[in-house]
Image (tube, rainbow, N blue to C red):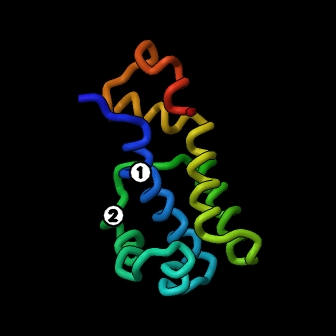
Amino acid sequence: MITYPAELEANLVLPAIRKEICIAAIASGLKQKEIAHILGITEAAASQYLRGKRASEVKFNSKFKIKVREIVKKVILGEIGGFSAVQTLAFEFKISGGLCRLHDTAGGIGPETCGLGEVCLK
């Protein structure tokens, strides 16, 4: 069965990004309730992200985690909202080739089928 990049993004990448935002926001001093409100998720979901009960399938590299911390600072300063933070990071993950790598492993789709990232990047 073919796994589409959009499925991976919705089911794996976006939850993993929300998890990383939760972790960075807690480290920056925000409360779990505030984080849930910013991201538009329940406090229970934020708690599960923080305890590692959700979104553990995708691991981000240190460079991406630095980007997450930078984005969280902008959220705290009120420069951007939670929705924009998630979308910005999802785009960053996509253009860095992260979605293509995930697509290759999860769906068994190699570069010859995927078109060397042409599918994942659209």
Provide residue 103's location: percent of width, then percent of height: 40, 33
Q: Residues within 10 Å of mark 2 (few under 14, many from 20)?
A: some
Residue 15 against residue 112 in the figure, above or below? below
Marks 1 and 2, how far apart at CA: 14 Å
Where is mark 2, residue-wise?
Answer: 54
Mark 1 and mark 2 lie on one chain; the one further toward the N terminus is: 1
Provide residue 56's location: percent of width, then percent of height: 35, 56
Mark 2 belongs to which amino acid? Arg
Provide residue 44's location: percent of width, then percent of height: 35, 80
The residue drawn where x is 39% and y is 28% is: 104
Residue 122 against residue 90 in the figure, above or below? above
The residue drawn where x is 50% and y is 32% is: 120
What is the secondary structure assignment of the residue under circle 2? loop
Provide residue 69's location: percent of width, then percent of height: 65, 63
Mark 1 belongs to which amino acid? Ala
Q: Residues within 10 Å of mark 1 (few under 14, many from 20)?
A: few
Q: Is residue 108 left or right of residue 91?
A: left
Find the residue positioned furthest to the top: 112
Checking the image for residue 10, the label placed there is: 1
The residue drawn where x is 37% and y is 74% is: 45
Residue 58 against residue 83 in the figure, above or below? above
The residue drawn where x is 46% and y is 64% is: 19
What is the secondary structure assignment of the residue under circle 1? helix
Q: Is residue 80 left or right of residue 54?
A: right
Question: Which quadrant, please, contains the C terminus?
Answer: top right
Checking the image for residue 113, the label placed there is: none
Question: Which quadrant, please, contains the N terminus?
Answer: top left
Number of marks in the rendered image = 2
